[in-house]
Amino acid sequence: MKLVGFNFDKISVEKMSSQFENLKISTKIDISDISSVKSDFFKTKEELLGIKFSFGLDYEPNIAKIELIGTILLSLDSKIAKEALKQWKDKKISEEFKLPVFNIILRKATLRALRLEEEMNLPLHIQLPSLRKDQETKD
């Protein structure tokens, strides 16, 4: 599975409050469509799949919302692509296919969400690494 393209089609952030008491942040990833893509631009023996997704962060209670909607273009072995398309007819996705796709979405969308959170002065939805002074130990 190779990532050929990744685009955001919609980027939305709304801040309703600056009061962060009782803050709970929930993350949602959803796949809305999987389809075969024909392209004269990409010459490959593998099959191309287009995957439409949404990534959302909800800052509860009614503090903020971030929504990212986009498309991923993947190059896959023909057998894996056909199986994914067959399962998608019933709106199902196998774990073997779902995990790498969700990891791609998480990696790309999290980076964009962090930038939006910084610009809107929202708490970050993930903990960033930080340095701390060593605690002195007594022997």
Image: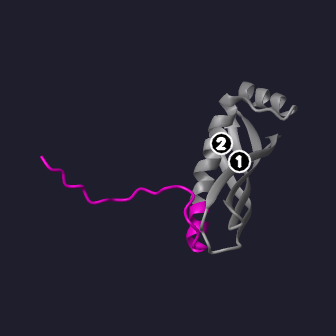
Give the residues drawn in magenta, as a range. 113-139
Residue nearest the viewer, comparing 41 with 75: 75
Distance between the Cα atoms at labels 2 and 1?
8 Å
The residue to which callout 2 is attached is: 102
The residue sitting at 80% across, 32% down in the picture is: 92
Residue neighbourhood size for the residue with mark 2, other residues' Cα within 10 Å, grouped as few (<14), some (14–19), many (≥20): some
The residue to which callout 1 is attached is: 29
> On the image, which quarter does residue 83 sit in?
top right
Circle 1: element type: strand
Q: Is 129 covered by the magenta stretch?
A: yes
Main secondary-structure element of the magenta-colored stretch = loop
User: Percent from the top left, x then y, of residue 26?
Assistant: 66, 53
Q: Which amino acid type is shown beneath numbered disc 2? A: Phe
Q: Which amino acid type is shown beneath numbered disc 1? A: Ile
User: Percent from the top left, x then y, of residue 93?
Assistant: 76, 32
62 lies above or below 92: below
Circle 2: element type: helix
Look at the image and name its color scheme.
one colour
Residue neighbourhood size for the residue with mark 1, other residues' Cα within 10 Å, grouped as few (<14), some (14–19), many (≥20): some
> On the image, which quarter does residue 23 sit in?
bottom right
112 lies above or below 85: below
